[in-house]
Image (tube, grey):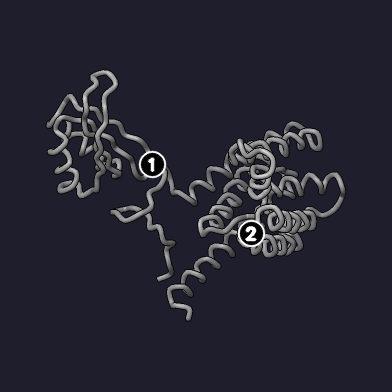
Amino acid sequence: MIKKDQYKRFGLDFLFLALGCTLLAFGIASILKPNGLVTGGVTGISVILDELLNIKYTYIYYALSLLILIASRILLGKREALKIILLSLFFPLLLIVFEGLNFDFIEDDMILASIYYGIIAGAGCGLILKRGFSMGGTDTIAKIIHRRLFPFTSLSQILLAIDIIIITMSVFIYDRKVALYAILTQVVFTKAFDTILFGFGSKKVKIEIISDENVVIQDYILNSIKRGISAYEIKGGYTNQNKNKIISICSPREAMLIKRFIADTDPDAFVDVLPVISVWGKGVGFDSLVEEELA
């Protein structure tokens, strides 16, 4: 029997998916294509093939999505295919609907169009991936290439190479100006995408402390700051002495409080602070490993 919590999670998944697909389809049909812009991924390939073959990019996108789905099933297995089947079938249909509406959000301003598309489409993709769905685009192509041809090359490098090839093609199909706007679009898209997934900036920091007063410092972090710690033994390369290193994840403000306490307790301590993109787990201000559910 399906539990109430599972219904809530399914509802939230569907909400994120629908909103994300709507934003992405709107960005492509109402901003990207009307202004003659090109981007990376399957969208970029579809737009370029539209120009070359004089076939609507929406139909090309649908055909490519189905081909990627079939290739994923054959080369990566059933599990990978299931991850993308919903997007491969649902999103192209939504794209065709928006194309039929023939609504131009931005006209005759490629800079504004690049920025608007990057923000809207990046937010849409972020919402989709935030709930664990896969777009079934060039990320899946990269997985196939990685597994079958270049296992020694990282997925991120393969994805970057694919986008570079697509944008380079736009130079010959269109002109250098379009390629430059494509780069701008990708930069804004990536920033919007990261913001949806991880929030604005670094909300947490990791503080690492090496001190002779580690017992006092640990007590301060645990009982005054109310943060958890990890501690382990290290060996200094210069002194060749064993010492304890304390590690804690906290807010930037809490890191400054810890710094001031250490400055008063052990001015000779070594402290380094690193930005943390996101923290998943139990703790004050941390994101839950389980997706947020509807109230």
For residue 158, what is the image quadrant?
top right
What is the distance, in whole Å, between disc 1 and disc 2 at their CAs? 30 Å
Numbered disc 1: secondary structure: strand
Picture quarter with the C terminus: bottom left
Q: Nearer the viewer, residue 149 or 93?
A: 149
Q: State the residue at coordinates (68%, 33%).
A: 180
Classed neighbour count for the residue bearing mark 2: other residues with Cα under 10 Å, few (<14), some (14–19), many (≥20): many
Q: Which of 50 and 75 is in front in this view?
A: 75
Residue 22 in view in this figure: no
The percent coordinates of residue 246 (x first, y second) are 24, 37
Looking at the image, residue 295 sits to the left or right of residue 91; the answer is left
The percent coordinates of residue 47 (x first, y second) are 76, 47
Q: Which of marks 1 and 2 is nearer the N terminus?
A: 2
Q: Which of 247 and 177 is in front in this view?
A: 247
Q: Tell me if residue 223 comes above or below residue 97 in the rendering.
A: above
Label 1 sits on what residue type?
Val
Q: Tell me if residue 14 comes above or below residue 70 in the rendering.
A: below
Q: State the residue at coordinates (72%, 64%).
A: 93
The percent coordinates of residue 130 (x first, y second) are 51, 56
The percent coordinates of residue 41 (x first, y second) are 68, 46
Q: Tell me if residue 221 comes above or below residue 79 in the rendering.
A: above
Residue 186 in view in this figure: yes
Label 2 sits on what residue type?
Ile
The residue where tag 1 is placed is 276
The residue where tag 2 is placed is 84
Extreme residue in the right direction:
53
Q: State the residue at coordinates (77%, 36%).
A: 169
Q: Nearer the viewer, residue 128 or 100?
A: 128
Numbered disc 2: secondary structure: helix
